[in-house]
Amino acid sequence: GYVCAIRAAQLGFRTACVEKRGTLGGTCLNVGCIPSKALLQSSHHYHMAAHEFANHGIKVDGLSVDLAAMMARKDKVVSGLTKGIEGLFKKNKVTYVVGAATLAGNGQVVVGDKTLSAKHIILATGSEVTPLPGVTIDEKRVVSSTGALALPEVPKHLVVIGAGVIGLELGSVYKRLGAQVTVVEFLDKALPFFDGEVSKQSQRLLEKQGLKFKLSTKVTGAQVGESGVTLTMEAVNGGAAETMEADYVLVAIGRRPYTEGLGLEAAGVALSPRGFVTIDGHFQTSAPGIYAIGDVVGGAMLAHKAEEEGVAIAEILAGQAGHVNYDAIPSVVYTWPEIAAVGLTEEAAKAKGLTVKVGKFPFMANSRARANEDSDGFVKLIADARTDEVLGCHIIGPAAGDLIAEVVLGMEYKAAAEDIARWRADWAEFMKQERVMFDRKSKNGPKPTNLRALVAEATLKNDGSVSLVLDWSTDYMSPQALVLAVNAPITPLAAHLLK
Ligand code: NAD
């Protein structure tokens, strides 16, 4: 919503954004992605210090966790960012209205005792936690992701219901901090919506870190006592009921659209049978002048997908060609190793009747991963066997969330698998040559570090080689130009672009 409001204001609309939380940024910033990532980073540092530093020859004595300090840092990250959005609203002249909005028909929105009138109304109310019958969330012992981001202590035994993104991320946080963590999942695998091989490998690697998985199991009830919770559960395909004790339970079985109190019915905004606001290809709801974006319309429940939609609708309303490419929206699970995906899984591509070829490469065979002591996982690329077009990429491994960006960019430009492979090879080749020249220059001087190079110019020569002009610099040297000939073959597409 805030991204949409800012874009609309930038495009010349007089814009107001109504928010009842009292802080901007929605679920992602306040009680979702950002606080999770803050805790994932802190707990990762602790895990590294406790278990990995020794491998690198670093000794740590007297290591301990100060959970209150960890939580305070997370809160500071969140408050800094929400205030940043308030600043962006001011800068872009978006009016921030604090309160709960109800649609009143005829382009009117009621917020407390105020009524706003608008030509265009955009709903971006997001989603809320899906409740689990028999398991009441009290945000104390039985928590949703919101409560799990602010536990007062590291649990002795945390039971997570749902082996999806939230379950594995927050389960990882508390496992790293010393909790015993059991993940109970209804289906027969963790991360069931990810590529099959990735899902299997993620479970294996998390089990290696100590998480326990109880698959094909449904939780039927939770009894909260003084110091913990007794869960009852049974196998999905029948079997005797069993109980499990936990001091905290995290319910993470998905999210559902949030439309409570919006007055949709009176305004004539139709919902799907599952409660999502229905829209056409241009975000238009069934009520003229009312549009909807983000989790409330369904699709991938990801903040960056919602932001794309927010920008697109603002541009469409301004008469521009706003567009979202739903085939190239990445998703990242911030466990360690990270898991990242874009496009079709192998299973989905085959189910669509496409003939695919699959390339897979393990991090075990990658020198940098080995040097970093981070060699678990693989990259899996799915391409159309007929056209070589990249259809999807699935990575489990170090920095997967960063690596996927290159494939997303490739997919935006309809890259072939060969384009991606050659780009890599050419880059490596060029870096090798560059290195030789570099070392020669630095023979008698201090050893330069942190080489940065930008291609300023590229020219295709008649003999098929490429001449590059690089702007390069290091910590010790100011920017300089370097002309370099690269003789590696290039793809027909690259040759065409260079011409
Ligand atoms: P999810 O859909 O990722 O996972 C829910 C899991 O719960 C699934 O594995 C499902 O099979 C299981 N489940 C459903 N009902 C169950 C039951 N009764 N008993 C046991 N298991 C059950 O949902 P989530 O983890 O709650 O996350 C919610 C949304 O937030 C997702 O759409 C997710 O993509 C998004 N999110 C994204 C990120 C990220 O991008 N890094 C992080 C957190 C959340």
Image (cartoon, rainbow, N blue to C red):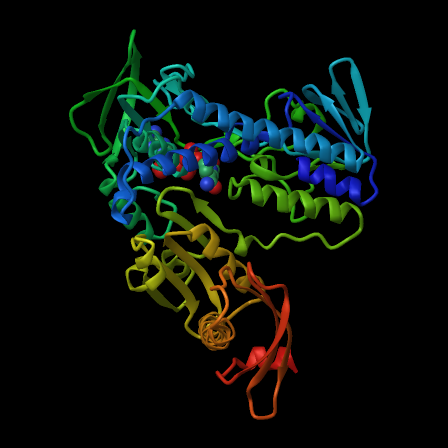
Q: Position of residue 236 (x, y in %)?
A: 24, 32
Q: In which quarter of the image is residue 97?
A: top right
Residue drawn at (28%, 26%) of the image: 179
User: Which residue, as the protein is rendered here, is positioned at the far bottom?
Assistant: 463
Residue extending farthest to the front is 444
Rendering coords of residue 307 (x, y %): 62, 43
* Image location of residue 373, percent across then percent down: 30, 53
From where the camera sits, is residue 379 visible?
yes
Q: Which residue is drawn at 35% across and 47% down?
A: 337
Quarter of the image for the N terminus: give it. Answer: top right
Q: Is 411 above or below relative to 172?
A: below
Name the quadrant containing residue 290.
Answer: top right
Query: Residue 214 appears at what percent x and percent y?
Result: 23, 34
Q: Which of 347 and 126 is in front in this view?
A: 126
Name, please, the residue furthest toward the top: 226
From this view, report whether residue 469 is shown above or below residue 344: below
Q: Is residue 354 left or right of residue 99?
A: left
Direction from residue 36 to residue 184 in the image, left or right: left
> What is the total number of numbered labels drawn onto the structure image?
0
The C terminus: image quadrant: bottom right
Q: Is residue 146 left or right of residue 307?
A: left
**Residue 150 can be seen, yes or no:** no
Ligand 1 is found in which quarter of the picture? top left
